[in-house]
Image (spheres, grey):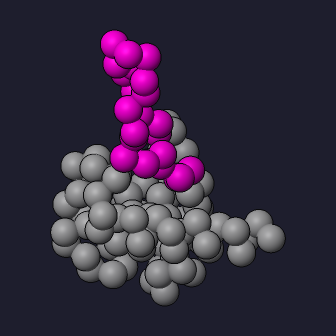
Amino acid sequence: MLETAKISENGQVPNLQKVQKPWPKPISVSIAAMRAGVVPETIVRWCKREGIGKQLRPKAPWRVDPVGLAIVVAGDKEALEAYQAGDLNHPSIERYADAARALERQRIG
């Protein structure tokens, strides 16, 4: 999600706080369960209760946000509150996003 900057009257673009890095891609319930060390049913329950996953349509497979998963597994209430509020640039979430990106690179590479 990139922020749009308004150009000032003198034609200068103000400094943006930072350009957000790409968000890690969703993972399957089975991969999430392996990462968290729990059964897939627990992942689905977390998706519903904590809002860390979604289904594109009823009965479709769940897609789990690896950042949300890491926050729930860590039990970080501050980060979970920010995540659930949609404040994905919150400082407490950044370390989880970086860790999820690193896992994604390992999986791809």
Which residue ends up furthest to the top in the rendered image? 9
Residue 4 visible in the snapshot = no
Is 98 situated left or right of 52 in this image?
A: right
Q: Position of residue 25 (x, y in %)?
A: 59, 54
Q: Is residue 15 magenta?
A: yes
Looking at the image, is 44 positioned above or below residue 87? Answer: below
Looking at the image, is 47 positioned above or below residue 42? Answer: above
Tell me the magenta residue range. 1-23
Q: Position of residue 96 (x, y in %)?
A: 42, 70
Residue 37 visible in the snapshot = yes
Of residues 27 and 102, the one drawn nearer to the viewer in this rendering = 102
**Which residue corresponds to the image point at 40% horizontal and 39% vertical from the top-left?**
15
Of residues 58 and 46, the one drawn nearer to the viewer in this rendering = 46
Q: Position of residue 17 (x, y in %)?
A: 36, 47
Q: Position of residue 56 (x, y in %)?
A: 51, 39
**Which residue corresponds to the image point at 34% horizontal and 52% vertical from the top-left?**
88
Q: Give the image quarter of residue 34.
A: bottom right
Of residues 109 and 91, the one drawn nearer to the viewer in this rendering = 91
Q: Main secondary structure of the magenta part?
A: loop
**Which residue corresponds to the image point at 30% horizontal and 64% vertical from the top-left?**
91
Is 24 situated left or right of 85 in this image?
A: right
Looking at the image, is 20 positioned above or below residue 45? Answer: above
Q: Is residue 50 magenta?
A: no
**Which residue corresponds to the image point at 35% horizontal and 71% vertical from the top-left?**
71
Is 53 situated left or right of 89 in this image?
A: right
